[in-house]
Amino acid sequence: MKVLIVEDEQHLAEGLRFNLEAEGFEVEVAATGEEGLKAAEAGGIGVVVLDVMLPGINGFDVARRLRDAGNYVPILMLNARGRPEDVLEGFDAGADDYLPKPFELRIFLARLNGLLRRSEWSRTADKERVSDTVEVNGRTIDFANLELRQDDTVLPLTLMEIKLLRYLIEHEGTAVSRRTILEDVWGLQEDTDTRAIDNFIVRLRKYLEDEPNDPKIVRTVRGVGYKFTTD
Ligand code: CA
């Protein structure tokens, strides 16, 4: 899955690239509206993250031109202005979702994954869905819908969170090393920082543990890596 980021703020674009690549996405960055339009028109893009304030043609116009040309690639629009009229103009231009700046990374990833899930959902709307859930510590992990449910709360999970969770659950009771996880779950992308795994583990603990700082489920095995256990 390739994400096109159209954003002229280089720091923000590179920060998003790092985190999306850690999530297993391929990423292309365009720094102007023209470049973004060209990249989106070239095809092969699964989702566009589109800033509004860009040099040259702005994000609203990029979205409009894509939609006018019949290109319905999902668009997550970013804008420093979150006034209702800006939000409305974004949707009017063809954005599927809208995120005001500044935003937290977690929110960005959740919105992006939500957008992908919805577009995947509509593509497969006619197919029968198989139930694919696991219960852990009073939480329901729904692999098909990329979410975790606890009581009345539904928490969207990212694709890589789900992949890592499934992997750890499949290896329940066995200590797996960071290197093995990196190979098996991430497909050993050489440029993936191994710290990415630690960040994911921290997040999984927040989701699953009653006391994330004293983990009983996603345990650290000193000198080895991690072990999933429900004993
Ligand atoms: Ca900008």
Image: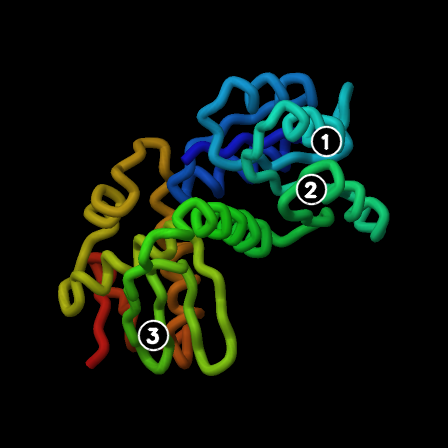
Above or below, 29 against 49 in this view is above
Q: Is residue 108 left or right of residue 2?
A: right
Mark 2 or mark 3: name the one nearer the start of the chain.
Answer: 2
| Mark 1 element type | helix
Query: Can you give x and y, in whole percent of width and height, for residue 3 in the image?
Result: 50, 34
> What residue lies at 54% left-to-right and 30% top-to-bottom?
4
> Farthest left residue?
174
Query: Can you give x and y, in whole percent of width and height, for residue 55 in the image?
Result: 76, 22
Q: Is label 2 in contact with label 1 (beta carbons under 8 Å)?
A: yes
Q: Is label 2 in contact with label 3 (beta carbons under 8 Å)?
A: no
Above or below, 85 against 206 in this view is above
Q: Amino acid at mark 1?
A: Gly
Q: Amino acid at mark 2?
A: Leu
Which circle marks residue 59 in the picture? 1
Mark 2 or mark 1: name the one nearer the start of the chain.
Answer: 1
Pair 2/3: label in front: 2
Label 2 and label 1: CA atoms lie apart by: 9 Å
Q: Is mark 1 within 8 Å of ligand 1?
A: no
Q: Quadrant of the C terminus?
A: bottom left
> What residue lies at 31% left-to-right and 53% top-to-bottom?
163
Label 1 and label 3: CA atoms lie apart by: 44 Å
Which circle marks residue 215 in the picture? 3
Which circle marks residue 19 in the picture? none
Above or below, 183 against 135 in this view is above
